[in-house]
Structures are given as structure tokens and as C-alpha cells.
């Protein structure tokens, strides 16, 4: 029964899409905006708004904010944040407008009709999902993964996705506070599979003061390590933090980072082959970084996983490492288990406040 409840939002979203004309879908995803309190909002559902781009507040792309109808004003709340992972193959051969429509659909699905939304509902917390572009055919400017190129890019609307997300978070917290909710400054962050997992991990490394707890997985056993050197080798971002000041404009805050609770996971199915190894895809890491990773931590994903876990233990990082057997894209049994475990992880963090 729990599994039916868990995946009902996904079935609902598919039914919603298949049961609408193109015009009806467009009216749902991109309806007319309203200006309220000098902010541009779009009310998509009773418990979902779309906040329009606001350069004056330092974000150049829209974001979605899900506010559960049963949200309590009697207790402190954390905002849950998840970055969308749009597959590159969906964006190939599409113009800019078509690509943004695809990003919009993925963000809407994530925030309102997915297992990620189910976590927000179970925790009864507000949930933010940004709508960031990944400007293909420039595959290397992987804004969704917060890779090196994305951090160093200075094209205004695409510059510093991390800072734009912080601006969105503060904007959403202000919206919630104005509505009478007691919102904590720190957030809960969730990410799964390649891009969104990398973003969650790297955002936490760069801005640990923003994050109360983070859960991420399937990033080919290569999270950014909170160290500058390993075995005499310099680890520049995103392998390590040797040049974090150049990348982020500030140093690494080890004290704040040590306070962040982390839940890090990997699945064995599909994660062993080269085709699914993000270290080799050329987008998450460049060739120099990939060679360094393989030399220091191994070419095999699971061997790498064991070494990375050991490094984190030696550093005293409060992280839980979990391996899920046979976890694939459509393995609903294991997906349900992961969703349940992540929810329980965040529940424990919230209850400890």
C-alpha cells in the first residue's frame, strides 16, 4: 500500500500530461503571471507557486515552490531543496526555447509529481526546485552539476548557479516568513544520480553554512573531498578544495562543513560499467581530473567507493555511506527503499533540532 501511495504522484503526473491537449499542458506549466507584493508569482495549484525570474534579487531563472497544505506554523521548518537532473539526450538537437520547455517539465515533475515531492510531503516541509538551463551543445558548461566550467563561467544569466540558488532560497524563505511560517536559515538538500547529486555535494562543500543535512547518490563514488592534497597530489575543485578560493571567492569552512549531516548512497546495478561512470563522461570532470581520480582512487567504481568512504572516516566527516544492491532507473523496489531511507534520515535530523 505504501508503494502505491509513493508512486501515485508519478502516475498522476503521467495521467495529467496524457489527458491534456498541448494548449492545456502549456496553460498549466506556463499560465499568466500575477504581480503580488511587487513579486511575480504564478499560482499553478493551491499548494504550488512558480516564482518568476527576478534579476533585482540576483536570480535569472524561475523556480517552483511547493507548500504543503498541512504545513504547520507552530514549529520551525526547514526548506527542502532539490536540483533537477535533465538528461542530455532529451536536449540534443533542440533550440534554446525547446530546451527550456524540457527543463520546465522536469522541474514541475520533480517539485509536484515525483518521489522527491513525496519526501517533502512525508516531512511536511516546503520544497524548492529551480529551473536552470544546461546550454547544450555546450555540454561542458554543466550548470546542473556545478562543475568547474559552470563555476568559472561569467556569462551573466548563467554565472554562479550556486549563488543564484542561494538568492532563490532566501527569496522563498522570505515568502514563507511573510505567510507566517517559522523558517530556519539552513536547508535540507537532496540530489540523486549524476548532475543533481553532484550539485548537492558540491554546493555543500562551497556553502556548508547553508546546509543542515544533505542526501545524494549515484555520483560514481566521487564526491568532492574536503581536502587540498592526497598522497602528495594536489586536488583542485571539483576533486578537492585546493583552489576553492579561486572557484568560490572564499575559503573552505571546515568547521561548518563538519556540522553537516550527510547521507551518501550508490547502487550496484549500472554503476559499474564505463558508460555510467560520471568520471569518464567528460562533463562532470575534465580529462586531467578523471586521470587523477583513477590514479588515486581507482578506475573501478566500487573500489573507488570504498576508498572515498575510508577517506571521509579518517577525516571524521559525519556521513553515512550506503550501498543498494541492483539499483537501476526502473528498479521501483529499491527506489522505494531509498526514498524511505532518505525520508527517515531527514526526519531524524529535524527531530534533533
Image (cartoon, helix red, strand yellow):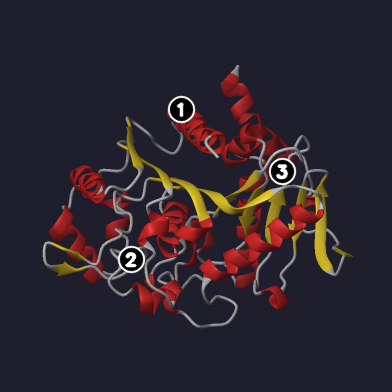
Residue 139: quarter of image: bottom left
Q: Of residues 97 and 32, which is closer to you in this image?
A: 32
Image label count: 3
Residues at badges 1 and 3 in contact (C-beta under 8 Å)? no
Q: CA distance from mark 1 to mark 3?
A: 27 Å
Quadrant where the N terminus sits is top right
- Above or below — where is 302 with respect to 34? above
On screen, residue 51 versus residue 11, left or right, reads: right
Q: CA distance from mark 2 to mark 3?
A: 38 Å
Residue 238's disc number: 2
User: Which residue lies at the image location 30% right of the left edge and 43% below the top edge?
Assistant: 271
Q: Tag 3's secondary structure?
A: helix
| Label 3 Cα crowd, 10 Å radius (few <14 / some 14-19 / many 20+) | some
Residue 337's disc number: 1
Q: CA distance from mark 1 to mark 2?
A: 30 Å
| Label 2 Cα crowd, 10 Å radius (few <14 / some 14-19 / many 20+) | many
User: Which residue lies at the image location 60% right of the left edge and 52% below the top edge?
Assistant: 106
Looking at the image, tell me whether mark 1 or mark 2 is earlier in sequence order.
2
Quadrant where the C terminus sits is top right
Write down the residue under mark 3. Answer: 17
Q: Can residue 205 be seen by looking at this rendering?
A: yes
On screen, residue 135 versus residue 289, left or right, reads: right
On screen, residue 348 versus residue 34, left or right, reads: left
| Label 1 Cα crowd, 10 Å radius (few <14 / some 14-19 / many 20+) | some
Q: Tag 2's secondary structure?
A: loop
Image location of residue 84, percent across then percent down: 55, 54
Looking at the image, tell me whether mark 2 or mark 3 is earlier in sequence order.
3
Image location of residue 248, percent across then percent down: 43, 74
Image location of residue 183, percent across then percent down: 68, 50
| Mark 2 vs mark 3: in front | 2
- Above or below — where is 167 with respect to 75? below
User: Which residue lies at the image location 27% right of the left edge and 59% below the top edge?
Assistant: 280
Amino acid at each position: 500500500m505504501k508503494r502505491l501511495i509513493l508512486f501515485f504522484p508519478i502516475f498522476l503526473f503521467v495521467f495529467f500530461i496524457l489527458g491534456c491537449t498541448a494548449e492545456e499542458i502549456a496553460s498549466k506549466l506556463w499560465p499568466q503571471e500575477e504581480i503580488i507584493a511587487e513579486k511575480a508569482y504564478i499560482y499553478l495549484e493551491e499548494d504550488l507557486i512558480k516564482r518568476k525570474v527576478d534579476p533585482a534579487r540576483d536570480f535569472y531563472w524561475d523556480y517552483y515552490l511547493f507548500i504543503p497544505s498541512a504545513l504547520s506554523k507552530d514549529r520551525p521548518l526547514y526548506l527542502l531543496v532539490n536540483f533537477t537532473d535533465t538528461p542530455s539526450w532529451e536536449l540534443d538537437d533542440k533550440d534554446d526555447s525547446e530546451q527550456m520547455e524540457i527543463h520546465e517539465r522536469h522541474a514541475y515533475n520533480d517539485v509536484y509529481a515525483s518521489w522527491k515531492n513525496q519526501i517533502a510531503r512525508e516531512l511536511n516541509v516546503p520544497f524548492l526546485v529551480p529551473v536552470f538551463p544546461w546550454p547544450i551543445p555546450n555540454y561542458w558548461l554543466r550548470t546542473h552539476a556545478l562543475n568547474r566550467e559552470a563555476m568559472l563561467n561569467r556569462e551573466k544569466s548563467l554565472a554562479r548557479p550556486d549563488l543564484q540558488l542561494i538568492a532563490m532560497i532566501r527569496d522563498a524563505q522570505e515568502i514563507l516568513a511573510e505567510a507566517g511560517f517559522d523558517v530556519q536559515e539552513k536547508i535540507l538538500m537532496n540530489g540523486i544520480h549524476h548532475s543533481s547529486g553532484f550539485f548537492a555535494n558540491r554546493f555543500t562543500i562551497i556553502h556548508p553554512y547553508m546546509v543542515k543535512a544533505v542526501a545524494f547518490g549515484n555520483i560514481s563514488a566521487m564526491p568532492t573531498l574536503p581536502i587540498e592534497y592526497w598522497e602528495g597530489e594536489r586536488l583542485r575543485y571539483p576533486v578537492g578544495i585546493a583552489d576553492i578560493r579561486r572557484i568560490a571567492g572564499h575559503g573552505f569552512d571546515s568547521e561548518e562543513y563538519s556540522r553537516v549531516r550527510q547521507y551518501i548512497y550508490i547502487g550496484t546495478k549500472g554503476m559499474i560499467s564505463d558508460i555510467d561512470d560520471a568520471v569518464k563522461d567528460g562533463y562532470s570532470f575534465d580529462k586531467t581530473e578523471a586521470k587523477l581520480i583513477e590514479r588515486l582512487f581507482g578506475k573501478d567504481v566500487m573500489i573507488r567507493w570504498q576508498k572515498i568512504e575510508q577517506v571521509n572516516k579518517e577525516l571524521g566527516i559525519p556521513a553515512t555511506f550506503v550501498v543498494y544492491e541492483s539499483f537501476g532507473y526502473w528498479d521501483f523496489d529499491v527506489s522505494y527503499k531509498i526514498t524511505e531511507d532518505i525520508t527517515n534520515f531527514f526526519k531524524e535530523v529535524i527531530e534533533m533540532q
